[in-house]
Amino acid sequence: MAVASEKTGAEGKVWSLCKMPFWQTSIASSSSSSSFASSATVSGQHQSHQAVERSSLHSSIAVSSMAKSFLPTRRRLRLDPSNKLFFPYEPGKQVRSAIGIKNTCKSHVAFKFQTTAPKSCYMRPPGGILAPGESVVATVFKFVEPPENNEKPTDHKSKVKFKIMSLKVKGEMDYVPELFDEQRDQVAVEQILRVIFLDPERPSPAMEKLKRQLAEADAALEASKKPPEETGPRIVGEGLVIDEWKERRERYLARQQVEGVDSV
C-alpha cells in the first residue's frame, strides 16, 4: 500500500511537472503576442495621427495662402485723383492731365507708368524713385481722336487705360525701367486709371483742380531746369588770389636779379 501511494504521488508530481512548462509557455506566448499587437496598434495610431497633422498643416497653409490672395494689397503710393485721369475734351488736339503721386512707405519706392495706347499717350516722368514721404505731380499727354458719327462730347468714351506700378528699392539710386523686370515678383499694381473727359468751357471742381495740378507740374519742371545752387564753401575773389600770386612771383624774380648783380 505504501508503495502504491508513493507511485501515485510520484506520478502526480511528474504530471504536474510536465504540465507546468506548457502552461507557462502558452501564457508567455500569449502575453508576447498581445504586447506585440498592442505596440503595433500604438504605432499605427501614431502614424495615422502624424498623417492627420500633416494633412491639416498642408490644408491650413493652402487656406492661408488663398485668404492672402483675396486680401487687398497694401498700397505704397497715394494717388490724387485715386482712380481717374481727367482730360479736357478737345478733339484733334493733344491735351494734358495730371496726377499726384506720394510715397506713403518708410522705404524708397519706384513707380512706373504703363498705358494701353503708347503711340498716342506718354507720361512725364514715365517713372521715378520717391523717398519716404516724397511726392511728385506727373503729367500725362494724350491725343484726342475726333468723334465719329458726330457724337457729342458727353457721349464720347475712351477705351485707353493707364496703370501705375510700384516697387520697393534699397535707398537712393538712379531710376531705370529694368528694375521692374529684374524684380518682377516684388512689383505691385497700384491702380488702373480710367480716362474721363471734361468740357473745358464748363467750369467744374475737377477742371479747376486739374489746372492747379498742371501749374504745379510746370513749376516743378522749370525749377528742375535751373542749375543747382552751390551749397558748399565758395571762394570769393578767386581772380584777386591769382593776381597776388603773380605779383609775389615777379617780386621774387626781381629780388633774385638784384642779388645776382650785387654778387657780381
Image: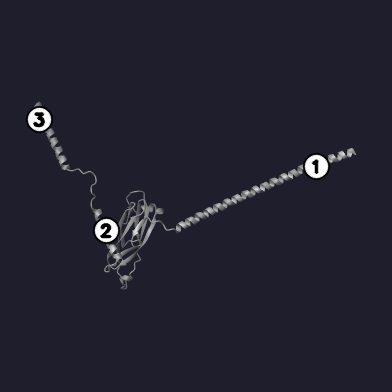
Q: What SS does tag 2 mark? A: helix
User: Gap in Å between the C-alphas at discs 3 and 2?
Assistant: 70 Å
Badge 3 vs badge 2, beta-carbon distance below 8 Å: no
User: Gap in Å between the C-alphas at discs 1 and 2?
Assistant: 115 Å
User: Which residue is labeled 1 in the image?
Assistant: 16
Image height of 264 relative to 224, above or below: above
Q: Horizontal and vertical percent for residue 162?
A: 35, 61
Which numbered disc covers residue 216? 2
Task: Say whether disc 1 or disc 2 marks the residue closer to the N-terminus.
Answer: 1
Name the residue rendered at 59%, 50% in the picture: 47
Residue type at the position of mark 3: Val
Q: Residue 237 is drawn in which quadrant?
A: top left
Image height of 253 relative to 109, above or below: above
3 vs 1, front mark = 1
Which numbered disc covers residue 258? 3
Extreme residue toward the right, this view: 1
Name the residue rendered at 11%, 29% in the picture: 259
Residue type at the position of mark 2: Glu
Q: In this view, does 263 lie to the left or right of 184?
A: left
User: Gap in Å between the C-alphas at discs 3 and 1?
Assistant: 148 Å
Question: Quarter of the image containing the C terminus?
Answer: top left
Name the residue rendered at 33%, 66% in the picture: 196
Camera-nearest residue between 192 and 236: 236
Question: Quarter of the image containing the N terminus?
Answer: top right
Q: Is residue 48 left or right of residue 143?
A: right
Image height of 112 relative to 241, above or below: below
